[in-house]
Image: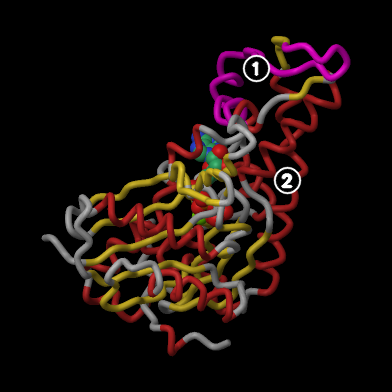
Amino acid sequence: MSISAFGIDLGTYNIKIYNGFNETITSQKNIIAIQKIMNKKNLFAYGDHAFEMYEKAPQNITVSFPVINGVIADINHMQILLRNFINDAMNNNIRSADYYISVPTDITGVEKRAFYDLVKESNVKARNIYIVEKAIADGVGLDVDVVNSQGILVVNIGYETTEISILSMGGIVLSRLIKVGGKKFDESIRNIIRKEYNLLVGIKTAEKVKIALPKLEENKEDAIVYGRDIVTGLPVERSIPVNLIEKAMSENFETIIDSVRVILERTPPELGADIYRKGIFLTGGSAGIGDLHELIAKSTGLKVNFSVNGEESVAYGLSQIIKTESLRSVVSTMQDVEY
Ligand SMILES: Nc1ncnc2c1ncn2[C@@H]1O[C@H](COP(=O)(O)OP(=O)(O)OP(=O)(O)O)[C@@H](O)[C@H]1O
Ligand SMILES: [Mg+2]
């Protein structure tokens, strides 16, 4: 059933778009490359193509992420990106559509309004613009009955943020957005390699090592990395033991686990029964990192359901909200947002 609507999860790393016209979810890097020629600035590349240039671009090309820590930091570039992504989704023929955009809960009203303004001002022929709290879309995307349950704990670990939320009866009871996620994991890996091996590796290399970690652990292999030796200044190859990578990650894991515990301590006791019965829902692109799900389970005594396709759970939830009449109560308009 084709619906003229889009669901958008505007991440700091990936923008995930549900296209109701052809019922697909696509993900692109939420990044833009701007070229400066004389005094003019031109769009050089966007999305995955721009990401290929990240850390490699010449001086006259600036590659940047317009969403920082979960909020829109650069509205002009974000508008250009959104318009191009929607234009591609509609094969260069933008038709009018409803937009459902997910927003973090623990941000200011002004920051929330920016998500609405973004869609309104990107020339994408938006008919109606609806706001959906990210954690609610996540819950729906993970097949939880968010409208009738009393007590659901969702932890979404993304790139720059981790959002920890308690949902009940289709609304949010508590939510905290902390600045830890995949980016911090990558930085910790870079830092420990620099400290222990005097070796400078790129961000993408660190990310590759992080993603390969479970496989390396399973095969009991070291991580092979290429980088620049800080002392000699020359490019080199080194093998890095897996336990060093695990050590780099542990501090970040502690921050996440502490925040989950703080939220649990503040949760009204009446909601505890459902949380205990259902366990914690761990999602987001970084949900599968190392043995974090086991550490959370150990430290909270709760079972942890973790999503293998966590990157898309918000966008998938938005698609369900768009298609299902009985989920309409979780949607709000800009008038409902207090600020
Ligand atoms: N298999 C994997 N193991 C560990 N991390 C992964 C894996 N696959 C992707 N990631 C990480 O997931 C992160 C991206 O996740 P996601 O798309 O949920 O973030 P985002 O929504 O853009 O960010 P945010 O929610 O913080 O705004 C990246 O840091 C990426 O390295
Ligand atoms: Mg996200």
Instruction: Say if disc 1 is inside 8 Å of ligand 1.
Output: no
Residue 212: in magenta span:
yes
Q: Amino acid at mark 1?
A: Ala
Whole-angstrom CA distance, mark 2 to mark 1, is 20 Å
- Please tell me which residue lies in front, 122 or 176: 122
Residue 104: x and y, percent?
A: 53, 68
Residue located 61% across and 56% down the image: 162
User: Would residue 286 be seen by someone viewing this image from the given angle?
Assistant: no
Say the numbered circle drawn on residue 118: none
Say the numbered circle drawn on residue 223: 1
Residue 332: x and y, percent?
A: 39, 81
Q: Which residues are magenta?
A: 207-235
Q: Residues within 10 Å of mark 1 (few under 14, many from 20)?
A: some
Height in image: 209 above or below 239? below
Which residue is at the far front? 38
* Mark before the other along the chain sequence, 2 or 1: 1
Q: Amino acid at mark 2?
A: Asn
Say the numbered circle drawn on residue 252: 2
Give the secondary structure at mark 1: strand
Q: Is residue 334 left or right of residue 266?
A: left
Q: Quadrant of residue 216?
A: top right
Q: Is residue 26 left or right of residue 220?
A: left
- Please tell me which residue lies in front, 337 or 220: 337
